[in-house]
Image: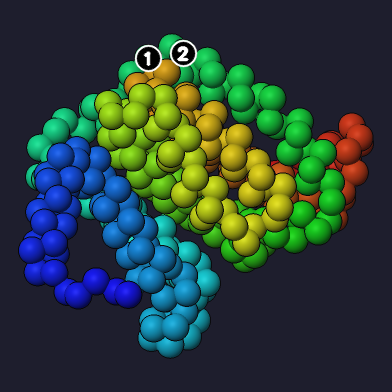
Amino acid sequence: MNEPNNPEKFVNELKNLREIINGLDKKVIIIFLSVAVLQTISWYYTSRKFFRNNLFEYIPSGYDVYLIEYAYWFISDFFTLFILSALIIKMILKENLKDYGLQLGDYKTGIKLTVIFLVVMLPVLWFVSAKESFVQKYPHLHSARDSWNVFFIYESGMLIYMFAWEFIWRGFMLFGLKEKFGYYAVLIQMIPFVILHNGKPELETFGAIAGGIALGILALRTKSFYYCVAVHIGIMFSIDFISSLRFRAGDYGIGFNSFLNIIKEIF
C-alpha cells in the first residue's frame, strides 16, 4: 500500500534538495543555463526561419530578400551568441574576457596549426567539390554564385557569424567549464556543436565530431578561440569559393586542365 502523505518527509526532501543545489558550482550552472537560453533564443528568434515567417513580407520589392534574410541571421546571432555571452561573463560572472579566449594567446602555434590545417583541407575540398550535387548546395545563398559583390557581402556576414558561433562553444562554454572539468570540457562542448549539425549532409555531421574535438583542443592549446574562427571560416570560404567557381565554369573535373579552366572564372 502507498504510504500516506508525510509533510515532514516532504520538507526533508526539499531541504536535501536545497543543500544539493547550494553545493553546486554556481559558475558551471550559469554557463550551462546561459548556453541553453542563448541557443534557444537563436533557434526561435534570430534564425532565418523566424525572418521568413515574420519579417519577409516587409522587405520592399527590388531587394535581394534572401541576402537580407542571411544578413538578419548573421547579425542577430552575433548579438545573441557573442554580445550577450560577453555581457554574462562581465556582468554576472564578473570575469575577464581574455580568460575565455578573447586574446591572441600563443599566436605562433595558432597561426602554424591554422595554416597546416587549411593546407591539408584544400586538396580534400577540391576533390569533394567535384560532385555537381555538392556544388548545388554551396554557397547556401545561391545568388552569391552569380555575383561576386553578393558573394563577398555574404562571406563577410558569415565571418561575423562564425566569430560568434566559435565564441559560444570554443570560448564561453569551453573555457568556462575548463576549470571544473579540465580537458573533458572539450567533449562537453563538442556534443551541442554536433547536434546543431543535424540535418546537414551526413559526412559534414560526422565530421563535426572530429572537428569539434580538434577545434576545442586548438583553443585550449593556444588559449584563444581566434584560430578556431580562422579554421572554420577558412574552410567555409574555400567551399563556397571553389563551388562558385565550378558552378560558373560548369567544370567538375579534378585534373590540372579543370583547375586552369576554373581559375579563369576569377577574372
Outermost residue toward the top? 108
**Marker disc for residue 252:** none
Foreground of the two, 236 or 148: 236
Q: Quadrant of residue 40?
A: bottom left
Does residue 86 appear in this view?
no
Left-right relation of 63 to 204: left
Q: Residues within 10 Å of mark 2 (few under 14, many from 20)?
A: some
Residue 236 percent coordinates (x, y):
59, 44
Q: Quadrant of the N terminus?
A: bottom left
Outermost residue toward the front? 1
Q: Is residue 39 above or below residue 261?
A: below
Left-right relation of 173 to 152: left
Q: Quadrant of the C terminus?
A: top right
Q: Is residue 207 above or below residue 153?
A: above
Residue 62 percent coordinates (x, y):
50, 81
Residue shown at the point (23%, 27%) measured from the top left: 98
Question: How was the colour assigned to the protein in this rendering?
Answer: rainbow
Does residue 46 appear in this view?
yes
Foreground of the two, 203 or 115: 203
Contact? badges 2 and 1 (CB < 8 Å): yes
Q: Residues within 10 Å of mark 1 (few under 14, many from 20)?
A: some
Q: Quick one: SS at disc 1?
A: loop
Residue shown at the point (66%, 24%) measured from the top left: 119
Q: Is residue 83 above or below residue 117?
A: below
Q: Quick one: SS at disc 2?
A: helix
Which residue type does callout 2 highlight? Thr
Real-space Cα distance between discs 2 and 1? Answer: 6 Å
Q: Which residue is mark 2?
A: 109
Residue shown at the point (61%, 19%) measured from the top left: 116
Q: Which residue is mark 1?
A: 106
Which residue type does callout 1 highlight? Asp
